[in-house]
């Protein structure tokens, strides 16, 4: 299923960090070493080339924050027990990247028809983020308040 995750510009008073979909081929020289570092730091079970391949097949969407070099997210839509979710597969960046982009991810999810955002991680960092709760040891955040 091709992810329909294109952002729609939205007017508001305070600027929200903008993550935008990118062609993986245009960011690969910067993105690949960051993916490789992630693979070497954690037992990911995948290689950077897997991300590249899935992005070219449009099975995943690669997002980037042009204002914060090195901040990337890889996501796709999936069905979790009859509920469409925006699955955040990979997040790379400095600082609290998920916390920083929570509102933007919720907007992307809603516009794509997802009722929930899911991010799976062996780390416990999501316990400190508002709105995220354990779900079968998978973290999710509802897009509807």
Image: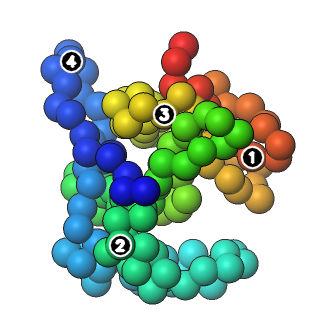
- Residue at (30%, 39%) from the top-left corner? 17
Q: Nearer the viewer, mark 2 or mark 4?
A: 2
Q: Of helix, strand and loop, which one carries label 3?
A: loop
Where's residue 138, x and y in %?
75, 46
The residue singled out by tag 1 in the image is 138
Q: Earlier in the sequence, mark 3 or mark 2?
A: 2
Q: Earlier in the sequence, mark 1 or mark 4?
A: 4
Tell me the number on the disc at residue 114: 3
The image quarter containing residue 33 is bottom left
Image vertical order of residue 82 relative to residue 145, above or below: below
- Residue at (23%, 68%) from the top-left corner? 23
Q: Are marks 3 and 2 in contact (CB under 8 Å)?
A: no
Q: Earlier in the sequence, mark 2 or mark 4?
A: 4
Q: Are marks 1 and 3 in contact (CB under 8 Å)?
A: no
- Residue at (46%, 53%) from the top-left corner? 76
Q: Earlier in the sequence, mark 1 or mark 2?
A: 2
- Circle 2 residues within 10 Å: few <14, some 14–19, many ≥20: few
Find the distance from the CA under tag 2 to the CA under tag 4. 34 Å
Q: Quadrant of the N terminus?
A: bottom left
Tell me the number on the disc at residue 12: 4
Image vertical order of residue 9 relative to residue 63, above or below: above
Q: Nearer the viewer, mark 1 or mark 4?
A: 1
The residue singled out by tag 2 in the image is 57
């Amino acid at each position: 299923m091709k992810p329909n995750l294109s952002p729609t510009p939205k007017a508001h008073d305070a600027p929200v960090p903008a993550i935008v979909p990118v062609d993986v081929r245009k960011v690969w020289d910067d993105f690949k070493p960051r993916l490789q570092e992630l693979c070497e730091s954690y037992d990911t079970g995948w290689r950077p080339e897997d991300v590249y391949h899935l992005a070219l097949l449009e099975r995943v969407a690669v997002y980037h924050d042009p204002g914060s070099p090195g901040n990337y997210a890889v996501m796709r839509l999936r069905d979790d027990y009859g509920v469409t979710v925006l699955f955040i597969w990979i997040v790379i960046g400095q600082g609290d990247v998920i916390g920083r982009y929570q509102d933007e991810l919720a907007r992307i999810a809603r516009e794509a028809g997802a009722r929930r955002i899911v991010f799976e991680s062996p780390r416990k960092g999501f316990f400190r983020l508002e709105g995220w709760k354990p779900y079968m040891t998978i973290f999710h955040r509802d897009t509807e308040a």
